[in-house]
Every structure is written in C-alpha cells, then in structure tokens.
Image (cartoon, helix red, strand yellow):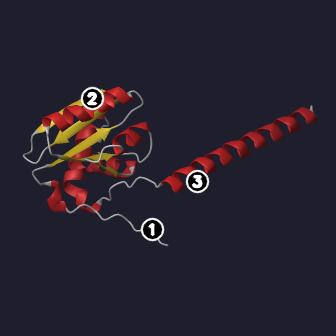
C-alpha cells in the first residue's frame, strides 16, 4: 500500500483569522521564534530547550491567541522540540531543508548574514509566502517508530562489532 503524501496547506489558509505563522530557529539550549498573526502583528522572543519551557511557551501562545491554529516553520523534522510540538493538535509543523532557508536568506538579505532572531523572522516570512508549497509534518505511526528504533539499534551494534574487530586486528598486528 502506497503512503499518501500529505497535502500542502492552501495559501489562503495562511491569512485566515485564526491562523498564526511562526518561524523557529532551533538550537541546543534555546530557540528563537518569530510570530506573525493574520493582521501582521509580530511577537518575537526565545524559549529554552526544556519540556517545561516549551509547554510554557505553548500555553502563552494559546492564552494570547485563543482558538488559533499555529503553523510552525523550522529547519528540522526530528528532535526533542519537534516531538514536544507534535503533541499539540493546534500546532502544525512545516519542516524545510536548511538550504531552502540559506537561499531565501541570500535573496532577502544582501549580506546573507545568519542569526537566530533573523532566521526565525525569515522562517515565518517563508511560511507566509510559500506555505502553499510546503507539506505539514506527519508523525510516524507506531510500527514505523518501532522499526526506526530497531534499525538504529542494529546500526549501533554493527558499529560496535566493527570497532571491536578493528581493535582486535590492530592488537594482533602488534
């Protein structure tokens, strides 16, 4: 059975009254965000990479924009932040390739300088302008998640076996 590709979000839905576009430039310790609502109002800032900080940030968004649907554009499709955001039904994630943002940055900023708040702003704008061409991230089903974990375990074991064989070979040569 062929897996269906998720449909892209129509451009006109990005400007719906209850829809909020957010760009997140992720990092190991803190994430910069840039939010643009349907009226063009902007909210920017950052939040830490902790479960509590992410939950507090989502709660703040929900309090400020009740009944809203949040579209998040980010340069990754896996990780702790993505897992935390996927738990919320009102947050739709649109991952993009880092090269897409790099090219967009070059087109929008003549110097092409990279910075967390600037990249978050560019991600939000990218979503506003090209959201109709992006596909929302669909979480893997349980069987796929289990298979991924098993494949990662196998890769780790094969790597360990190779390292031990190389170490043994080096010892025998001495």
Image location of residue 35, percent across then percent down: 19, 40
Q: Is residue 171 above or below residue 6?
A: above
For the residues marked 2 and 3, what is the alpha-carbon distance in whole angstroms?
32 Å
Residue in view at x 28 percent, y 63 percent: 8
Mark linked to residue 3? 1
**Closer to the camera in the image, 19 or 67:** 67
- How many numbered marks does the figure carry? 3
The front one of 2 and 168 is: 2
How far, Cα to Cα, is label 2 from label 1? 35 Å
- Spot the residue most to the bottom: 1
**Residue 141, horizontal then vertical, whole percent:** 46, 55
Residue found at x 44% / y 45%: 78
Q: Position of residue 110 (x, y in %)?
A: 24, 44
Q: Which residue is mark 2?
A: 56
At x 32% / y 59%, what residue is drawn?
135
Sequence-first tag of 2 and 3? 2
52 sits to left or right of 110: right
Question: Mark 1 packing: few (<14 Cα in 10 Å), some, or many (20+)?
Answer: few
């Amino acid at each position: 059975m062929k897996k269906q590709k998720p449909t892209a979000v129509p451009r006109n839905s990005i400007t719906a009254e209850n829809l909020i576009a957010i760009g997140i430039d992720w990092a190991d310790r803190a994430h910069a965000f840039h939010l643009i609502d349907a009226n063009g109002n902007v909210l920017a800032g950052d939040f830490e990479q902790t479960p509590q900080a992410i939950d507090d940030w989502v709660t703040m968004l929900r309090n400020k924009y009740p009944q809203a649907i949040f579209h998040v554009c980010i340069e990754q499709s896996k990780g702790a932040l993505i897992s935390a955001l996927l738990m919320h039904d009102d947050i739709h994630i649109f991952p993009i390739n880092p090269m897409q943002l790099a090219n967009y940055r070059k087109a929008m900023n003549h110097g092409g300088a990279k910075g967390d708040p600037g990249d978050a702003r560019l991600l939000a704008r990218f979503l506003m302008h090209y959201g109709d061409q992006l596909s929302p991230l669909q979480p893997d089903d349980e069987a796929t998640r289990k298979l991924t974990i098993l494949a990662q375990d196998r890769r780790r074991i094969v790597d360990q076996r190779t390292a031990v064989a190389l170490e043994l070979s080096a010892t025998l040569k001495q």
